[in-house]
Amino acid sequence: MPIWHASLRRDFDMPPEWRIMSDAFILNRGRLNHMDSLQFNVSQLLREPSGATRSYELDDDISDLTDQVQVTAPLRGTVQFTRTSDGILVEGDLETSVQVLCSRCAIDFVQPVRIEMEEEFRPTYDVVTGLRIVYDESIELDDATMIDERHMLDLSEVMRQNLIVSVPPFPTCKPDCAGLCPHCGQDLNEGTCNCLADSTDSRWSVLQDLLDQRTNPA
Ligand SMILES: [Zn+2]
Ligand SMILES: [Zn+2]
């Protein structure tokens, strides 16, 4: 388990001797978590002029990124880092999938999720002088988008937030899921129940059931 984390670390910006040191450091940290795989050393990119870019292909296990959704597939896709005058703009187009409950019939199913993200990260320390950067009070800083003192850019919190908002609020197992009978709970995908036959005018009750489902999604 610890091995894949080490192999997913992206130290392309580091000279080889640093890479060895940092891998040893990581392997000595005991239990590893997702934080390692979504960290990027950007010290070299920060030294480059505005417009300089790096692209990274991700294929990462993010199953422990959040408790709010159950991730069932690796996070795959591309992130592009672009040096800006203020820091580094991260643009990502990624895919994964999550386990969700159908909002109509309540079965578990796997929902593919696309994550399109765009976030600008800012350095905490000047990469050339090593001095802490003092930001004007008018600039809103967010801990999730600060590059740390080791010039590591950590995508995990931004990715967690983007993942959660990318999951549809009312997922459906299939576009035409018939849902559950609001009266007896029968899964109408598996067949009709007797509730409709019991009512006085079945044509109207079908409409009423549809209205009920619209106004009160399960
Ligand atoms: Zn369903
Ligand atoms: Zn029924």
Image (cartoon, rainbow, N blue to C red):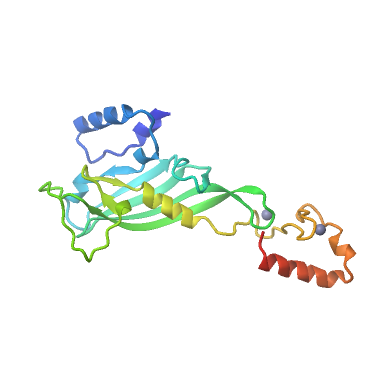
x then y, percent, for residue 38: 35, 43
Residue in front for this viewpoint, 169 or 113: 169
Horizontal side, residue 6 vs residue 114: left or right: left
Note whether 145 is above or below 23 in the view shown. Answer: below
Q: Quadrant of ligand 1?
A: bottom right
Observer-nearest of 108 and 95: 108
Question: In x, y percent, where is residue 136?
Answer: 18, 63
Q: How many marks?
A: 0
Q: Quadrant of residue 15?
A: top left
- Residue farthest to the front, as pictured: 137
15 lies above or below 103: above
**Residue 115, image quadrant:** bottom left
How far from the left and from the top, in percent, is residue 116? 42, 57
Q: In the picture provided, is 181 more to the left or to the right than 135?
A: right
Quarter of image, res 31: top left
Point out the image quarter for the N terminus. top left
Q: Which residue lies at the image location 76% right of the left edge and 53% below the top edge?
A: 187
Q: Position of residue 138 (x, y in %)?
A: 22, 66
Quarter occupied by the C terminus: bottom right
Residue 197's place in the image compared with 39, above or below, is below
Most distant residue in the left direction: 129
Identify which residue is drawn at 47% across, 53% down: 164
| Left or right side of 207 for 117 | left
Q: In this image, 27 relative to 127: left or right? A: right
Q: Residue at x 22, y 54 (%)?
A: 52
Is 129 in front, or is 216?
Answer: 216
